[in-house]
Image (cartoon, coloured by chain):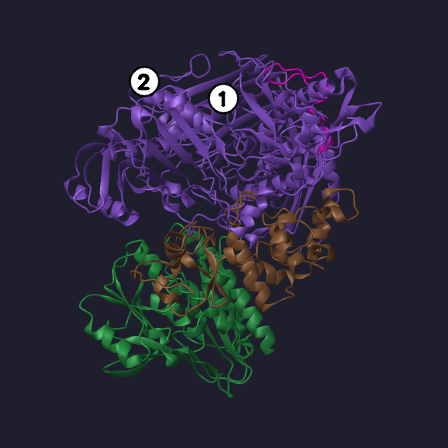
């Protein structure tokens, strides 16, 4: 519960970062095109740069800082870590919030639904594949991801048989492709 | 490598991922120093103009303004290789978007309001926008004072009185004569527009001016020591007076390799009485003010025998370097010595010109000129193959470098260089080269396949070096200190793996201090050029060996045995024949204490270093010499489907092979390939700056500058790693960071030619360009 | 801060109307804000007050009546339209248009009415709503009026709304039995993009009337004259439609595309659209 008095022109993004010191949410463009500032607003993913802080009066806003519980990473966060979905990390908070929004409204999304939910978040480093795989893994996590074992102790990729990078990637993607026109 | 590896070569996930996935990772704009001010920049609306008058009165009166600066306040010249740039434009502006004034204020809003109230009077001057026009006699000069600029002599050769910042020549054999005598000749021209790196985190720097001219900086940079060095030179300060921290960095891709906003933040802080100042680029400023990848016009001539042996290659590369030389001169140099592709060519002549224009200046960008050059070379190779009636893959096989060949700079190709032919064969196999595509998914669509080679060596000074320090903690864990930057590539994890492997520690007990600090972490040249794993890895290996020597010496003394008998394994040191008499690292890390209290040894701190070996300058007339510490070769093969009514291209499958020498971490290596290929798709299909007739950038935002999204991926991407070891590489590894992006456009351009029978020469291959090409059905002319 | 403006969030229409009428400077209506706030940030718009209409219950209506008529309130975000199965069933073209806009996050904020009132020549909601014969309800303290959507667009980013008026809802009339609707949008890439050109169609097999509208090829979205399909062959109808579009379009060259490309590709979209609509209508 936060109480504050804000000027009308302050954006929700500015409010979160500059007034509440929640710097996990990032600014990537300021015009809603890149998704780096995605937060959940009454449970729905929105770009905080195009929401006025004052609009949040009486509403619930969730940011990446709330994803872990008592220092324990969520399954979604673990999946991101273990599938290699994180490189520079700047798009990661926005990705997490878009994914969290998706998994709340659809706990078993299809590949196309994952792409549709995540496509509003730009990434320049990863080429997206590992991120999409992370969301799928989080929606159907393997048993070892649900234990309390330390994150990173057993990368998802290594639990599989298969000798080549190609084999691993096929599993990580689940099906052959997460892309439009993807075949099962 | 016959040695059984424990950690190196496994897919250890990054430990920085945890800070990133929780929002705890702090990037430069997440930092707040007490009293920190915020800066805004006023930029030039003109591509070329004289600054007649600046009125700051109104600006200074905005409440909260602490400093206002214009170019005439600052007598500082900047430049990596050629000192041609000011912190703020002085006397003239040379590109639309160039910073003209800056304000530091209590709030960003106040700074922006003040900028809006600065009145500048300009007198427009003739601008030159096309580098070919800029090379013509009588063209307006972007730098009339070129003669007076300091530059790296013996390496770069600016031509005063012209717009040529550098001219690199390769002369091997007698290309003109050989071409004239060739059985078959091909000439083709190509164009790459300038593009932007588009890191998700824009440039940002904080500077705090301290007493005696000292300054402390926090910056989103790939090269803290380069920032320190360049500021030392241009501010006239000893290196120790400048301290540079690099926190988390949200992507660089070369755009953050040199000086960015650090000089401006520094002078603003000085002008504001030493208060820290944050300068952070908006996304529009990132596109319009911060540097880009230089554009390239290329003309390539190939001569061949009838049976497909290339006898000669001539190339002219005209680089659109924009208003300042920055890295552009080195891109022009590197592209020249790589500029014939990975082929054995006896007669080669290359002229690479780096040319000033009145546009945003070019800098390093992933691939460092190689994507641009190989767009032309690999398209020309295909066109020559077709002219000869040869299969493009076979034509390449006949000409790829093999053991015993020499490169165009006279370097001998050895077994240790890797196997480009194997890369070609690997991708050809995956894509089903030689088999026709399946039927297209609709009658108005056609399919095609294409192949392209890639190669690159680190483009770096002959004396490039780096160092690493490893210190042991009280609990026997190791802490690695380096000043290379992990801005996403994952090298820090690889270095941890190497340290763990060498020290006999579990990976969980090896840490790498995330932030670089020139006061505390040891020297690294720059994190560019795909050299960090190679050079940093070697430095870490040496540092680990140093730690082991110290552990061994103390343990030997403690146990009263010869140090040759000591083995270090499983976090313990013990005589090989007596494993029971082990001393844990933690009992050696700060020295060893005997039962009676006597102590020996001391804190264990190992250091290692690596310096490039065997590199030579290139002969200024012939380009002969040894520029490359190592080469990495690779290939792409791609299958596409084209909608012939809209011009849209879908990538069905792209296979990418890289001869990595040794895959140090499969997960992050794969990440580099997928990420690089997708970034390459951006350059191929969507990206390019558009300028109007007056040199103003028309697409400085994501509305009209499009990068690939999650919807724009190929249906399948197959990364393939070959492991032909690199002598001198850590565990035989080579760098692979830039390579996956290189030649993506060429492979797709070749596939498009296969599908449509049309040779496209200009990027990007947007739906518009493809469709209009189909409509006119003729070879695309370079603009 | 985006700008210096006052912000009010009325809970009734009369309150909103008063705020607009009594504002001592330009006032702007804030629904999703995905165009407005970007324009304010870019200093293309400088309103004195933002009137947030999202708490006015009347404007959150999203109804599909049993006969298939639609009411879309001004404060209804696009994702709500997309997720309403009954709308997808009654007007698939409407949902296709909504889905093509921006990103998932932006569609949680952007509204159909807002997209129309922004009046970009490329407004993605316009072509299909024009083809469906939608009306816009416009309210002010002076009264309420019903405006055919085609009357809304006056020029590039210019509407026929007076400064004190609020567009409160869209009404799509009861569709003819078996009505088919489709929307096609040409983009520069598959990811989110503005339209290079767009086309929408509505075809009623029972009446044999084909209504087409096109976007991003003239200063405003264009509703073409209805085409009587009758017994014409599909190919003949396609050609008639293409001729009509070619006669009506006045494309420009801009950063997104050249006029040449727009001229080349819009007929392709129109042919595909017509073929799709007529095929399902079962025409010969």
Q: Is residue A108 above or below residue B701?
A: below
Q: Number of numbered discs present?
A: 2
Q: Mark on residue B713?
A: none
Same chain for mark 2 and mark 1? The answer is yes
Q: Pick the residue in front: B336 or A29.
A: A29
Q: Identify the residue at horizontal 48%, vertical 42% (top origin).
A: B199
- Image quarter (top left, top right, bottom left or bottom right) of the N terminus of chain B: top right
- Image quarter (top left, top right, bottom left or bottom right) of the C terminus of chain B: top left
Q: Which residue is mark 2?
A: B161
Residue A17: x %, y % from top left:
40, 52
Q: Color used for chain B?
A: purple
User: Whole-Å distance between the Cαs marked 2 and 1?
Assistant: 21 Å
Q: Color used for chain C?
A: green
Please indicate, yes or no, whether residue B140 appears anywhere in the rendered image: no
Please indicate, yes or no, whether residue B66 appears anywhere in the rendered image: yes
What's the magenta bit mostly, secondary-structure-wise? loop
Q: Color used for chain A?
A: brown
Q: Which residue is mark 1?
A: B333
- Is B4 on the left-hand or right-hand side of B427? right
Q: Pick the residue in front: B170 or B730.
A: B730
Residue situated furthest right in the rendering: B577
**Badge 2 or badge 1: first in the primary sequence:** 2
Which chain hosts label 2?
B
Q: Identify the residue at horizontal 22%, vertical 29% (top origin).
A: B73
Q: Pick the residue in front: B436 or B91.
A: B91
Residue B65: name its quadrant: top left
Q: Which residues are magenta?
A: B398-423
Q: Residues within 10 Å of mark 1 (few under 14, many from 20)?
A: many
Residue C217: x %, y % from top left:
40, 60
């Amino acid at each position: 519960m936060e109480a504050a008095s804000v000027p009308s022109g302050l954006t929700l993004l500015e409010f979160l970062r500059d007034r509440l010191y929640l710097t996990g949410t990032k600014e990537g463009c300021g015009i809603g095109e890149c998704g780096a500032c995605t937060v959940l607003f009454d449970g729905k993913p929105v770009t905080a740069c195009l929401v006025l802080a004052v609009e949040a009066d009486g509403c619930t806003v969730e940011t990446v800082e709330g994803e872990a519980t008592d220092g324990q990473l969520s399954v979604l966060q673990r999946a991101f870590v273990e599938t290699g979905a994180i490189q520079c990390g700047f798009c990661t908070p926005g990705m997490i919030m878009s994914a969290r929004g998706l998994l709340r409204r659809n706990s078993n999304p299809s590949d196309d639904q994952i792409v549709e939910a995540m496509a509003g978040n730009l990434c320049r480093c990863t080429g997206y594949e590992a991120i999409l795989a992370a969301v799928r893994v989080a929606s159907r996590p393997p048993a070892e991801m649900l234990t309390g074992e330390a994150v990173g102790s057993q990368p998802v990729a290594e639990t599989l048989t298969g000798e080549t990078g190609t084999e691993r990637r096929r599993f990580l993607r689940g099906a052959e492709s997460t892309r439009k026109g993807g075949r099962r | 490598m016959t040695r059984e590896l424990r950690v190196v070569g496994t897919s250890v996930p990054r430990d920085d991922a945890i800070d990133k996935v929780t929002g705890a990772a702090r990037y430069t704009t997440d930092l707040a120093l007490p009293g920190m001010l915020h800066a805004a920049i006023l930029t030039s609306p003109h591509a070329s103009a004289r600054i007649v008058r600046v009125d700051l009165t109104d600006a200074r009166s905005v409440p909260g303004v602490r400093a206002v600066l214009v170019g005439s306040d600052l007598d500082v010249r900047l430049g990596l290789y050629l000192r041609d740039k000011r912190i703020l434009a002085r006397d003239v502006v040379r590109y639309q978007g160039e910073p003209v004034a800056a304000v530091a204020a209590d709030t960003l809003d106040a700074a922006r309001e003040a900028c809006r109230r600065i009145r500048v009077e300009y007198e427009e001057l003739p601008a030159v926008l096309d580098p070919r026009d800029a090379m013509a006699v009588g063209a307006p000069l972007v730098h009339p004072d070129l003669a007076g600029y300091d530059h790296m002599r013996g390496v770069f050769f600016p031509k005063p009185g012209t717009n040529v910042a550098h001219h690199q020549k390769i002369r091997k054999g007698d290309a003109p004569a050989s071409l004239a005598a060739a059985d078959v000749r091909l000439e083709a021209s190509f164009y790459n527009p300038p593009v932007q790196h588009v890191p998700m985190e824009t440039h940002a720097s904080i500077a705090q001016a301290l007493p005696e001219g000292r300054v402390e900086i926090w910056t989103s940079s790939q090269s803290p020591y380069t920032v320190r060095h360049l500021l030392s030179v241009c501010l006239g300060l000893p290196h120790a007076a400048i301290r540079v921290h690099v926190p988390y960095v949200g992507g660089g891709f070369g755009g953050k390799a040199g000086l960015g906003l650090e000089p401006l933040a520094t002078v603003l802080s000085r002008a504001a009485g030493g208060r820290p100042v944050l300068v952070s680029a908006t996304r529009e400023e990132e596109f319009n003010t911060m540097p880009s990848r230089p554009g390239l016009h290329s003309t390539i001539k190939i001569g061949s025998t009838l049976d497909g042996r290339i006898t000669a290659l001539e190339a002219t590369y005209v680089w659109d370097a924009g208003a300042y030389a920055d890295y552009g001169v080195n891109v022009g140099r590197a592209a020249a010595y790589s500029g014939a592709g990975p082929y054995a060519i006896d007669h080669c002549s290359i002229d690479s010109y780096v040319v000033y224009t009145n546009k945003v200046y070019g800098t390093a960008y992933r691939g460092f000129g190689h994507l641009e050059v190989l767009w032309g070379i690999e398209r020309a190779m295909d066109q020559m193959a077709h002219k000869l009636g040869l299969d493009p893959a076979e034509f390449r096989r006949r000409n790829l470098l093999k053991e015993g060949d020499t490169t165009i700079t006279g370097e001998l190709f050895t077994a240790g260089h890797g196997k480009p032919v194997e890369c070609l064969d690997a991708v050809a196999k995956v894509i089903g080269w030689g088999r026709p595509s399946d039927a297209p998914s609709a009658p108005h669509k056609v399919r095609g396949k294409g192949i392209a080679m890639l190669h690159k060596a680190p483009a770096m000074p002959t004396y490039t070096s780096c160092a690493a320090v490893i210190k042991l903690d009280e609990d026997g864990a190791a802490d690695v200190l380096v000043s290379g930057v992990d801005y996403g590539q994952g090298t820090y994890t690889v270095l941890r793996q190497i340290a763990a492997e060498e020290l006999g520690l579990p990976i969980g007990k090896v840490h790498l201090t995330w932030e670089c600090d020139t006061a505390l972490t040891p020297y690294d040249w720059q994190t560019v050029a795909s050299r960090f794993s190679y050079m940093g890895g070697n430095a870490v290996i040496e540092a680990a060996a140093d730690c082991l020597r110290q552990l061994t010496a103390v343990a030997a003394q403690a146990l009263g045995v010869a140090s040759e008998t000591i083995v270090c394994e499983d976090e313990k040191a013990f005589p090989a024949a007596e494993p029971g008499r082990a001393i844990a690292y933690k009992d050696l890390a700060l020295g060893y204490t005997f039962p009676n209290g006597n102590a020996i040894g001391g804190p264990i701190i190992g250091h290692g270093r690596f310096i490039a070996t065997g590199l030579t300058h290139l002969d200024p007339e012939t380009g002969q010499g040894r520029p490359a510490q190592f080469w990495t070769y690779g290939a792409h093969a791609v299958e596409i489907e084209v909608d012939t009514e809209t011009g849209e291209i879908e990538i069905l499958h792209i296979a990418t092979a890289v001869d990595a020498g040794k895959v140090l971490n499969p997960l992050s290596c794969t990440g580099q390939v997928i990420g690089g290929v997708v970034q390459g798709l951006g350059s191929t299909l969507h990206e390019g700056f558009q300028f109007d007739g007056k040199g103003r950038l028309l697409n400085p935002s994501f509305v009209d500058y499009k990068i690939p999204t999650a919807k724009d991926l190929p249906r399948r991407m197959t990364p393939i790693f070959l492991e032909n070891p690199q002598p001198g590489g850590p565990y035989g590894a080579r760098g692979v960071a830039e390579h996956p992006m290189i030649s993506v456009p060429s492979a797709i351009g070749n596939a498009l030619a296969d599908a449509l029978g049309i040779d496209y020469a200009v990027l990007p291959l947007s739906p518009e360009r493809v469709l209009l090409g189909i409509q006119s059905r003729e070879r695309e002319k370079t603009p | 801060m985006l700008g210096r403006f006052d912000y009010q969030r009325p809970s009734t229409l009369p309150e909103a109307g008063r705020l607009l009428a009594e504002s001592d400077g330009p006032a702007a209506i804030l629904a999703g804000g995905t165009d407005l706030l970007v324009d304010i940030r870019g200093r293309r718009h400088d309103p004195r007050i933002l009137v947030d209409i999202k708490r006015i219950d009347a404007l959150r209506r999203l109804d599909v009546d049993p006969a298939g008529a639609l009411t879309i309130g001004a404060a209804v975000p696009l994702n709500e339209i997309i997720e309403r199965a009954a709308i997808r069933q009654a007007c698939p073209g409407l949902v296709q248009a909504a889905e093509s806009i921006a990103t998932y996050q932006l569609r949680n904020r952007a509204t159909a009415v807002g997209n129309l009132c922004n009046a970009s020549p490329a407004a993605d909601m316009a072509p299909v709503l024009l083809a469906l014969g939608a009306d816009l309800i416009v309210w002010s303290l002076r009264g309420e009026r019903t405006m055919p959507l085609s009357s809304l667009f006056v020029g590039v980013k210019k509407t026929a709304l007076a400064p004190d008026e609020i567009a409160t809802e869209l009404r799509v009339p009861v569709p003819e039995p078996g009505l088919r609707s489709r929307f096609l949008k040409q983009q520069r890439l598959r990811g989110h993009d503005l339209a290079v050109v767009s086309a929408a169609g509505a075809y009623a097999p029972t009446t044999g009337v084909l209504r087409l509208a096109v976007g991003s090829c003239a200063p405003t979205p264009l509703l073409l004259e209805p085409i009587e399909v009758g017994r014409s062959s599909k190919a003949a109808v396609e050609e008639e439609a293409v001729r009509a579009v070619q006669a009506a379009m006045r494309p420009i060259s801009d950063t997104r595309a050249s006029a040449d490309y727009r001229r080349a590709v819009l007929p392709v979209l129109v042919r595909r659209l017509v073929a799709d609509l007529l095929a399902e209508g079962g025409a010969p």
